[in-house]
């Protein structure tokens, strides 16, 4: 048998590209195309109320790892003297929320604290936090909530597709209902109401 000849120069090794055009649920393909290079990344877009969980990437042998669109909070509301409801664009879950309440920083009139309890509604879209008592005064008792995801599995919030909900970039102001006090009392006027 004849010996195999040596290469006269180094040979390039081709790597498969990935078709990354599949849009995530609740989003679009963004700058992801049909020929994403191996080792490359692209950024899908997400609908309003959602953010990407990261970037879509192309691994070896054309294997794509897709980013997902995770829901964001769309409203924060005081619902009683000691509860705050946070409404998300889509369902969120946490198997061990009771031990993950430290991820939520609540400030009431400048005093920071951690919720004492938390529940997620049956449809997964409303998270209710139990907090220290708040007064009815909206101007003297401002309320904010900040979510900072921890790294302990089952404690952080995640979407129905298993991707972690992103941390808030800043504290969110909690809304309060207003009252219509224009009805005058019997035998009187409405004064400054």
Image (spheres, grey):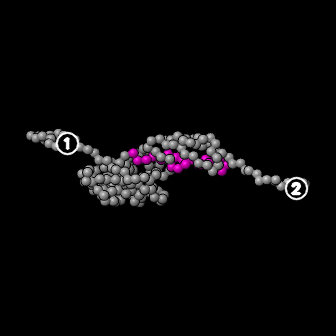
In this rendering, position of residue 1 left or right of residue 94: right
| Residue displayed at 62% across by 40% down | 34
Q: Which residue is mark 1?
A: 181
Nearer to us in this view, 9 or 56: 9
| Callout 2 secondary element | loop
Q: Position of residue 107 (x, y in %)?
A: 33, 56
Magenta-colored span: 53-74
Q: Image point 29% across, 47% down: which residue?
A: 176
Numbered tag placed on residue 39 in the rendering: none
Q: Position of residue 52 (x, y in %)?
A: 50, 47
Element type at mark 1: loop
- For this orientation, the residue located farthest to the left is 187
Density class for disc 1 (Cα within 10 Å; few <14, some 14-19, many ≥20) is: few
Callout 2 touching callout 1 (CB < 8 Å): no
Residue 3, numbered label: 2
- Is residue 189 one of those drawn in magenta? no
Is residue 2 among what the camera can see? yes
The quadrant of the picture occupied by the N terminus is bottom right
Q: CA distance from mark 2 to mark 1?
A: 98 Å
Q: Is residue 162 visible?
A: no
């Amino acid at each position: 048998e004849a010996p195999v000849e040596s290469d006269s120069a180094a040979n390039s090794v081709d790597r498969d590209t990935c078709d990354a055009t599949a849009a995530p649920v609740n989003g679009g393909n963004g700058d992801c195309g049909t020929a994403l290079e191996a080792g490359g990344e692209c950024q899908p877009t997400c609908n309003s109320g959602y953010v990407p969980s990261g970037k879509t990437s192309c691994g070896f042998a054309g294997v794509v790892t897709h980013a997902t669109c995770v829901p964001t909070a769309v409203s924060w509301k005081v619902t009683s003297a000691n509860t705050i409801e946070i409404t998300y664009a889509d369902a969120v879950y946490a198997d061990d929320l009771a031990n993950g309440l430290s991820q939520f920083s609540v400030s009431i009139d400048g005093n920071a604290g951690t919720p004492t309890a938390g529940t997620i509604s049956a449809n997964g879209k409303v998270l209710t936090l139990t907090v220290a008592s708040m007064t009815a005064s909206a101007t003297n008792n401002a309320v904010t909530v900040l979510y900072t995801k921890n790294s302990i599995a089952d404690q952080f919030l995640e979407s129905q597709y298993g991707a972690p909900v992103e941390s808030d970039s800043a504290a969110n102001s909690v809304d309060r209902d207003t009252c219509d006090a224009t009805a005058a009392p019997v035998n009187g006027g409405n004064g400054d109401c």
